């Protein structure tokens, strides 16, 4: 079998939007998406001491279901929602909702202290994960969608679960016949100034208000995928 590239995303709607596109683009690898039912970097029960185990739990679940070995997994790619986690504290304000409410300028909720605590925890875990090159012996890399996947792909914020599903289906249907247009779409509408270098793109998203704005660095990975597929595709 082909080696597996396992993408870790936050929700089922994220998987719906992206898995089919990546499976068509990555013709010489088996692409699968697993979702974590929420943001593990915001989970207060997860720390630097156990976050690798938490991520590997999803890898192991896929391996058990698919009856494959760890050596069959070529790469783990985690896609993070930035959620404004690196903005200055002045961008965090009290609002009218119990849930966090996002704009491209600020985050609000009735208890703004919750946002401050979430951001501090999320930054600590993401910074730790970005320092890793592997998890349990499997190559690991992290990429981002900002402010979150809905914002990056659809230009929308604060969607309900039903709206997320609906938008994911619309998005996939727009690219399923022409997945090669996905990279140009990101570069034209979503990258929005993020550098082409992987380390620089992460420095950029942590600066100023960028982690609330519409950005991604997933284009960097897709450029690498395109080059790899071109080199390894056997002419018919």
Image (cartoon, rainbow, N blue to C red):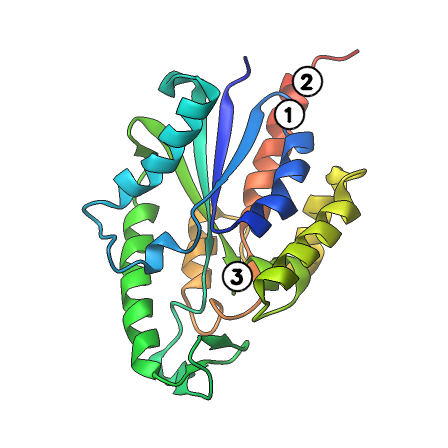
Q: Residues within 10 Å of mark 3 (few under 14, many from 20)?
A: many
Q: Residues within 10 Å of mark 1 (few under 14, many from 20)?
A: some
Residue 148 is tagged as 3
Q: Residues within 10 Å of mark 2 (few under 14, many from 20)?
A: few
**Residue at image point 60% right, 26% down:** 228
Q: Does residue 193 show up?
A: no
Query: Please, is residue 25 above or below residue 195 in the view?
Result: above
- Identify the residue position indicated by label 1 in the image: 229
**Residue at image point 30% right, 42% down:** 54
Query: Of marks 3 and 2, which one's residue comes earlier in the chain?
Result: 3
On screen, residue 178 versus residue 117, left or right, reads right
Q: CA distance from mark 1 to mark 2?
A: 6 Å
Query: Please, is residue 84 above or below residue 14 in the view?
Result: below
Query: Of marks 3 and 1, which one's residue comes earlier in the chain?
Result: 3
In this view, the residue in front, 172 or 215, is 172
Count of labels in the image: 3
Q: Position of residue 7 (x, y in %)?
A: 49, 38
- Number of the front mark, 3 or 1: 3
For residue 152, which quarter of the picture? Answer: bottom right
**Residue at image point 35% right, 53% down:** 40
- Residue reaching furthest left? 49
- Identify the residue position indicated by label 2 in the image: 233
Q: Position of residue 159 (x, y in %)?
A: 59, 68
Q: Quadrant of the N terminus?
A: top right
Q: Secondary structure at mark 1?
A: helix
For residue 112, which quarter of the picture? Answer: bottom left
Query: Please, is residue 51 above or below residue 158 in the view?
Result: above
Q: CA distance from mark 3 to mark 2?
A: 33 Å
On screen, residue 44 versus residue 162, left or right, reads left
Is mark 1 in CB contact (under 8 Å) with mark 2?
A: yes
Q: Position of residue 19 (x, y in %)?
A: 61, 39
For residue 103, which quarter of the picture? Answer: bottom right
């Amino acid at each position: 079998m082909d080696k597996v590239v396992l993408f870790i995303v936050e929700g089922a709607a994220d998987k719906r939007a992206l898995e089919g596109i990546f499976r068509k683009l990555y013709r010489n690898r088996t692409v699968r998406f697993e979702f974590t039912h929420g943001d593990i970097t915001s989970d207060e029960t997860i720390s630097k001491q156990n976050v690798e185990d938490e991520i590997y739990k999803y890898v192991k679940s896929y391996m058990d279901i698919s009856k494959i070995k760890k050596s069959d997994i070529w790469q783990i790619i985690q896609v993070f929602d930035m959620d404004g986690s690196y903005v200055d504290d002045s961008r965090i304000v009290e609002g009218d909702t119990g849930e966090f409410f996002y704009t491209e300028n600020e985050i609000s909720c009735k208890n703004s202290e919750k946002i401050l605590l979430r951001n501090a925890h999320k930054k600590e875990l993401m910074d730790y994960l970005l320092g890793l090159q592997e998890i349990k012996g499997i190559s690991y890399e992290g990429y981002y969608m900002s402010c979150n996947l809905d914002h990056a792909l659809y230009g929308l914020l604060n969607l309900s679960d039903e709206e997320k599903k609906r938008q994911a289906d619309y998005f996939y249907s727009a690219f399923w016949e022409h997945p090669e247009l996905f990279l140009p779409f990101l570069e034209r509408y979503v990258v929005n100034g993020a550098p082409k270098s992987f380390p620089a793109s992460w420095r950029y998203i942590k600066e100023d208000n960028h982690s609330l704005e519409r950005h991604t660095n997933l284009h960097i990975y897709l450029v690498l995928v395109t080059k790899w597929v071109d080199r390894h595709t056997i002419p018919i």
